[in-house]
């Protein structure tokens, strides 16, 4: 798997690199015997000989999610200066990791020991981006990170670091795309810290290809009075696994995790989230909805911990799935582990077909069966899309839905 | 308009319609009455094209076309409308958005031009006023959180929007108070014309004081067993259905 790769040249901490190498030496890829990977097979990743090739993208037209944004483009994880913005707005500093000096990249909060994809990402880090949002800065224009996979059996180990300073407010858009990519693999990590009373929103669109793989881990920590929102929209990708680990270490925080996934063909999408409430007086809301067509398979695993003494926590978690065919399937497991007594938590999971009574009703009014189903799917997934505040992201999502599914949701 | 001949239909192997005949001409209003379980809703569902039923015998001619051969949506596009006895709630699907899609798909089917947004909104205003449906309800999710009366009014609102040739109202009056009943009846009467017709399925004679039928039929055990003028409804109300049963066994 790794023969064709060269160790990273990014100036990471020596100890972390050693730890990553150590994990790679001692561990195999996870198997479905491991609880966290029970429904997601990654064996095929081990059978591919990856390279890290530098490629270029001719046109950004299909990938530019927001027209008015500070855009950084990476192809196979390599920074593309000519496709990226050269003006960076006030209140924020942005740099590719490859341009960072020794010591500029803070020590990681990722778990390296035993976590093979984090270790792989670290030891062979292609490049990444460091976004520092200054304290008290309100950054109007979103920062947009576009990542394109291109070529055959290419592996991108890509990292995003976001430090949202105290009292800052910013939005980051992440778009993952593929262009003439065959068996390509994006192995992505994000390290995100949300400072005191900061607001950070991430809109993440995954639109790679039917035979690409994508594994990402977002490691987030939230300080007092902060609000963190991430909207994950997965519309294409052969194998997609999103790990979202949120540590709420400050009081009076709000955490919003929203996800929509629409699968067809033989796509597999696995959303794993952990919200760890370590302190009292916080709210977390999680809403994930999926529509699974053809032979698609989806996994939802959402875990909420409420630690001892983390009183007055409101944690809500909901996952809904619609299966469009008999071959489509989903494994949904919302979990609460509560060690405090004065909390309000709920979780729920539904899986079903579209309401055939409603389809008949709509058809009896003259709608074609296709339109009727489309309307109902859009209504179902609309709850999640309604959470997206950035109009450009929403419009772009609608465009992708139309392109890929022929669904016009507006 | 519609000619139903010897219609037999079953569900899950159980025969419900057992040789039903009915002819409705343009400009007419027909009432179908009958006890619970007689097969009234089954008739409505079969005509609208619900796929759960198996048609074992008979034919239905709808203005020269074989109705039973058409998909549900094509029946609607040809001008058949069913006001459901139990309108479904469809969370997230906006009433007027879906109606707009419906109208434009019907127009496309007929080779007509799409309705402009302006014309559509004007029609919504006009027709929602006709059935005194709060315009806010018109734009909410289909029937979601509507009261029983609002659901029925919404059915008539949709009927007004779609201007069908033949409307079948399945117990649209049940559960309505007298004000709601008047509103619904007024809607139906206003839409009545020489080139359309209605089949009004009801349990109670009361509705027929407001929607005056040209004919009253009694549906009993899957068949029309008696037909007569509007006075038949009063007789039924007075004597109940046992009278029919007795008459049949004679
Ligand atoms: N899914 C079904 N399976 C079996 N029998 C059914 C089903 N649906 C309705 N029926 C039966 O069909 C008969 C007619 O029902 P329906 O048409 O609803 O009567 P009405 O509208 O006249 O009250 C009833 O005896 C009812 O129990
Ligand atoms: Mg009935």
Image (cartoon, helix red, strand yellow):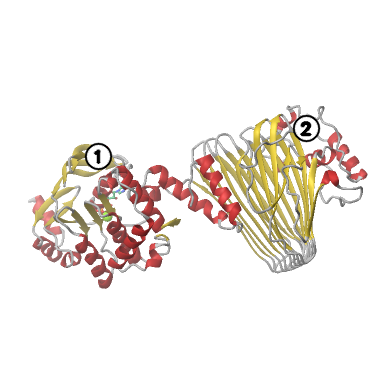
Quarter-of-image position of residue A62:
top right
Question: Would you say residue A325 is visible in this rendering?
Answer: yes
* Residue at (23, 53) in percent of width and height: B167
Q: How many labels does the image show?
A: 2
Q: In this view, does B235 lie to the left or right of A113?
A: left
Chain letter of the residue beneath label 1 in the structure image: B
Q: Where is residue A374 in the image (x, y as percent from the top left)?
A: 45, 46
Residue A178 - label = none
Q: Is residue A5 left or right of residue A201?
A: right
Q: Which of B153 and A408 is in front in this view?
A: A408
Q: Which of A226 and B105 is in front in this view?
A: B105
Vertical position of residue A71 compared to residue A197: above or below: above
* Residue at (31, 62) in percent of width and height: B152
Q: Nearer the viewer, residue B82 or A201?
A: A201
In the rendered image, residues at marks 2 and 1 fall on the same chain? no
Q: Position of residue A50 (x, y in %)?
A: 76, 29
Identify the element where label 1 is drawn.
helix
Q: How crowded is mark 2: few (under 14 residues within 10 Å), some or many (20 or more)?
A: many
Does label 2 point to a residue whose CB lies under 8 Å from ligand 1? no
Do tag 2 and tag 1 residues touch (Cβ < 8 Å)?
no
Give me the C-alpha separation between circle 2 and circle 1: 62 Å
Q: Nearer the viewer, residue B86 or A227?
A: A227
Instruction: State the residue position of label 1.
Output: B68
Quarter-of-image position of residue B51:
top left
Q: Where is residue A174 in the image (x, y as percent from the top left)?
A: 68, 48
Vertical position of residue A101 compared to residue A307: above or below: above
* Residue at (19, 63) in percent of width and height: B189
* Residue at (86, 50) in percent of width and height: A105
Residue A52 - label = 2
Residue sticking out furthest to the bottom: B179
């Amino acid at each position: 798997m790794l023969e064709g790769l060269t160790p990273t040249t990014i100036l990471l901490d020596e100890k972390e690199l050693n730890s990553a190498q150590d994990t790679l030496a001692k561990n195999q890829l996870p198997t479905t015997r491991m609880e966290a990977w029970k429904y997601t097979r990654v064996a095929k990743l081990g059978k591919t000989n990856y390279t890290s090739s530098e490629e270029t993208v001719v046109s950004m037209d299909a990938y530019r999610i927001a027209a008015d944004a500070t855009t950084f483009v990476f192809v196979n994880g390599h920074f593309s200066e000519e496709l990226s913005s050269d003006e960076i707005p006030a209140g924020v500093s942005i740099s590719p990791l490859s341009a960072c000096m020794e010591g500029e990249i803070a020590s990681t909060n990722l778990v390296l020991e035993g976590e093979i994809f984090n270790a792989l990402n670290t030891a062979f880090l292609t490049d990444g981006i460091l976004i520092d949002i200054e304290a008290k800065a309100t950054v109007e224009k979103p920062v947009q990170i576009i990542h394109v996979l291109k070529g055959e059996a290419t592996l991108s180990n890509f990292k995003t670091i976001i430090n949202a300073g105290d009292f800052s407010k910013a939005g980051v858009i992440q778009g993952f795309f593929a262009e003439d990519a065959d068996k390509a693999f994006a192995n992505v990590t994000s390290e995100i810290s949300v400072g005191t009373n900061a607001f950070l929103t991430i809109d993440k669109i995954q639109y790679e290809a039917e035979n690409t793989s994508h594994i990402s881990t977002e490691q987030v920590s939230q300080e007092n009075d902060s609000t963190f929102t991430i909207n994950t929209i997965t519309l294409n990708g052969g194998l997609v696994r999103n790990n979202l680990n949120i540590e709420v270490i400050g009081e009076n925080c709000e955490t919003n995790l929203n996800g929509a996934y629409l699968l067809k063909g033989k796509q597999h999408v696995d959303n794993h989230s952990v919200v760890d409430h370590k302190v009292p007086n916080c709210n977390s809301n999680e809403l994930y909805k999926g529509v699974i067509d053809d032979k698609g398979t989806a996994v939802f695993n959402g875990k909420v911990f409420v630690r001892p003494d983390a009183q007055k926590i409101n944690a809500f978690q909901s996952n809904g799935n619609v299966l469009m065919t008999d071959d489509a399937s989903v494994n949904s497991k919302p979990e609460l582990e509560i060690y405090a007594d004065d909390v309000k938590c709920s979780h729920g999971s539904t899986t079903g077909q579209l309401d055939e009574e409603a389809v008949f009703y709509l058809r009896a009014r003259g709608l074609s069966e296709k339109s009727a189903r489309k309307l109902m799917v859009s209504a179902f997934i609309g709850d999640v899309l309604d959470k997206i505040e950035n109009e450009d992201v929403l419009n772009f999502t609608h465009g992708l839905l139309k392109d890929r599914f022929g669904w016009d949701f507006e | 308009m519609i000619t139903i001949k010897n219609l037999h239909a079953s569900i899950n192997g159980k025969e419900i319609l057992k040789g039903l005949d009915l002819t409705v001409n343009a400009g007419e209003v027909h009432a179908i009455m009958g006890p619970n379980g007689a097969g009234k809703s089954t008739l409505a569902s079969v005509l609208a094209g619900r796929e759960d039923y198996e048609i074992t015998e008979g034919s239905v001619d709808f203005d020269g076309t074989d109705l039973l051969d058409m998909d549900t949506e094509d029946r609607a596009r040809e001008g058949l409308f069913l006001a459901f006895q139990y309108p479904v709630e469809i969370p997230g699907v906006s009433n007027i958005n879906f109606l707009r899609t419906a109208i434009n798909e019907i127009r496309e089917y007929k080779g007509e031009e799409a309705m402009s947004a302006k014309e559509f909104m004007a029609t919504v205003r006009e027709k929602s006023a006709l059935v005194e449906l709060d315009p806010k309800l018109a734009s909410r999710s289909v029937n979601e959180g509507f009261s029983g009366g609002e659901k029925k009014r919404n059915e008539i609102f949709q009927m007004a929007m779609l201007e069908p040739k033949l409307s079948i109202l399945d117990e649209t009056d049940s559960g309505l108070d007298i004000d709601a009943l008047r509103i619904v009846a007024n809607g139906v009467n206003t839409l009545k014309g020489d080139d359309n017709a209605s089949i009004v399925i009801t349990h109670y004679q009361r509705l027929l004081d407001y929607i005056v039928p040209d004919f009253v039929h009694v549906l009993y055990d899957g068949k029309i067993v008696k037909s007569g003028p509007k006075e038949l409804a009063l007789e039924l109300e007075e004597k109940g259905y046992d009278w029919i049963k007795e008459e049949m066994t004679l």
